[in-house]
Amino acid sequence: MNINKIDLNLLVYLDVLLREGSVTRAANRLSITQPAMSNGLRRLRDLFNDPILVRTSDGMTPTKRALELQPVIRDVLGKLENAIQPEQDFDPLESKRTFRIMASDYAESTLLLSLLGALQEKAPKIVLDVITPSDVTFHDVEHGKVDMAINRFEELPLSFHQKVIWYDAFSCVVNINNPVLNSFDLENYLKAQHVWVSKTGFGVGVGIDPTEVQKLGWVDSELNKFGQKRDIRVFTRHYHVALQLARTQNLVATLPSKIANMYADDPQVKILEPPFDIPPIGLKMAWSSLLHQDAGHIWLRRLIADVASNLSHSPKLS
């Protein structure tokens, strides 16, 4: 196939068709008629010798070949769009830009507190708009509507750029009057009552079924490996709620160490190593190819990496 004979507008059509999953919506986004978009889909099918989109019970579904092409086309178009934009210098001291960041409760409580301090020093006019995972979809990030997503992701679309910010171990937060402290071993850990907390990925969460151990996350998956299960009495999506419950009630909170360390100086709690091994978790930032070459975005990513590297990685155990 000779690229000189390809209408590069077809790549734009392909990108929008795969993102919208509809000829009508794709035509509306590109401000062209539906027949023109249908003709573009026909030419794409001829070009790649593949149906590209097929009608199923779920609507128009991309083929395997189309899914393979999508991240490649998105990356190429993203680079081209950035290349033809007028080059602009980014001055953090003068910039009044608003950066919209999706962050989990975990990331907001640890990383973003320190990031805000760095911004006040290096870029005092920049505004952060922090939104929750429940308010964001993959498409929002892919389309550049959200500058950055910071969370613990089990998987991400291939079109996203991503970077691990840090890895974090686990610690247990326990009220000083909790009887479990008499002997904090695995047997007594399992006899104790617990508070569970987690929120990963994107989108609106659903209720937890305590019997579905495989969906409860890292802590319970590790216990399940040797046939054990903890007694969870409260499920929450907010780490500060879990910390307060562990502080004021006889509940054990097993949390990422950076969250647990926020209570390291509180005389009402003890912070201990879990009585069994739990693999560390990775906090990632992810962003769209559309923003990858943006000068301000590059500056923000570097600042986030610098802030993360300066934060202590070692748990402060009691």
Image: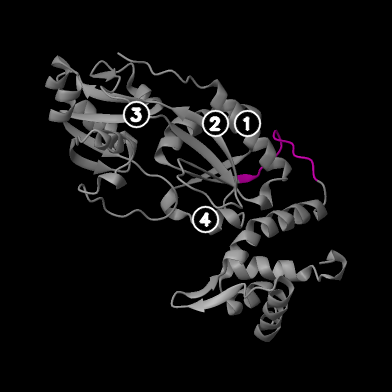
Q: Residue at x 82, y 51 (%)?
A: 86
Give the position of the N terminus as an image quadrant: bottom right
Residue placed under numbered mark 1 in the picture: 303
Amino acid type indicated by mark 4: Phe
From mark 3 to mark 1, how far is it between C-alphas? 30 Å
- Local packing at callout 4 (Cα closer than 10 Å; few below 14, some 14-19, many 20+) is some
Mark 4 and mark 3 lie on one chain; the one further toward the N terminus is 4
**Which one is nearer the viewer's eye here, 221 or 2?**
2
Residue placed under numbered mark 2 in the picture: 115
Residue placed under numbered mark 3 in the picture: 278
Query: Quick check: 299 left or right of 264?
Result: right
**Which one is nearer the viewer's eye here, 248 or 173?**
173
User: Which x, y percent locates residue 56?
Assistant: 48, 77
Mark 4 and mark 1 lie on one chain; the one further toward the N terminus is 4
Label 2 element class: helix
Query: Quick check: 239 left or right of 114?
Result: left
**Which range is magenta?**
88-98
User: Which x, y percent locates residue 282?
Assistant: 47, 34
Q: Are marks 2 and 1 in contact (CB under 8 Å)?
A: yes
Q: Is residue 34 above or below residue 48?
A: below
- Tag on residue 138? 4
- Tag on residue 117? none
